[in-house]
Image: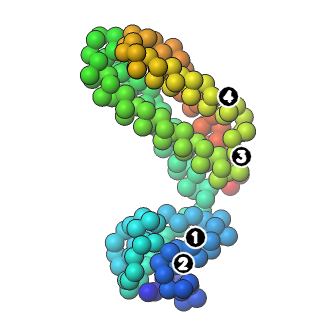
């Protein structure tokens, strides 16, 4: 299998012939040059790392990479754009609970939880890539407050206390997300200042 990184053929990458060995070599090489693999295309089929590691053939694999900082900036920009949509959605969920539209509120609550989880992962991963870890600024305090709000929300949900859920969303969770937004902005500023 021929291996290409950012359009350049790499005849020295053969590994032991296995796709997982090739992937490890390419990722290591990208990392050594401050880059990260963003796309894998085997015979014009885009696939993720897990799928590629399991293949046993193919004519050519094209890896696309980008600088880590570019990926971090892009991810943080997406997070900053998403936060207002998340808080608007949480407001709608609280309104559903206040208006006794429990099924609608619960249906959207799962989406809100998934979105919040994505935001936390983006922040954590970007912090790690920027080598600021979890101690950057007040991230530990913010994460603890978010976790506390989510825990309270879960308790109210299990007890079917929908008005308390609405109150928790409006008075605890949304303000914590707004603080979290400032933390994400700090990471974004750090990423753009260290280029």
Mark 2, residue position: 21
CA distance separating discs 1 and 4: 34 Å
Residue shown at 42% from the left, 72% from the top:
54
The residue beneath circle 3 is 132
Q: CA distance from mark 2 to mark 3?
A: 30 Å
| CA distance for labels 1 and 3 | 22 Å
Q: Which residue is mark 4?
A: 141
Q: Residue 189: image x %, image y %?
A: 65, 42
Badge nearest the viewer, 2 or 3: 2
| Marks 2 and 3 close (CB-CB < 8 Å) | no
Q: Residue furthest front?
A: 159
Q: Which residue is painted at 58% across and 88% down in the image?
A: 12
Q: Position of residue 31 (x, y in %)?
A: 64, 67
Who comes first in sequence, dot 1 or dot 4? 1
Q: Label 1 crowding class (10 Å Cα cut-off): few <14, some 14-19, many 20+?
A: some
Gap in angstroms between the C-alphas marked 4 and 3: 15 Å
């Amino acid at each position: 299998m021929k291996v290409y990184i950012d359009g350049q053929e790499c005849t020295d990458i053969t590994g032991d012939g296995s796709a997982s060995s090739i992937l490890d070599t390419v990722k290591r090489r990208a990392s050594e040059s401050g880059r990260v693999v963003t796309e894998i295309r085997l015979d014009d089929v885009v696939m993720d790392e897990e799928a590629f590691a399991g293949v046993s053939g193919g004519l050519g694999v094209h890896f696309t990479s980008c600088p880590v900082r570019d990926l971090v900036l892009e991810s943080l920009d997406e997070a900053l754009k998403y936060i207002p949509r998340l808080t608007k959605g949480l407001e709608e969920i609280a309104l559903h609970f206040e208006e006794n539209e429990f099924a609608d509120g619960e249906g959207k609550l799962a989406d809100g939880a998934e979105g919040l989880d994505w935001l936390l992962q983006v922040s954590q991963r970007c912090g790690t890539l920027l080598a600021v870890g979890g101690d950057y600024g007040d991230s530990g305090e913010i994460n603890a407050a978010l976790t506390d709000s989510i825990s309270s929300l879960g308790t109210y949900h299990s007890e079917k206390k929908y008005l308390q859920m609405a109150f928790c969303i409006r008075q605890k969770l949304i303000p914590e997300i707004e603080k979290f937004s400032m933390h994400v902005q700090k990471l974004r500023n750090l990423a753009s200042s260290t280029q």
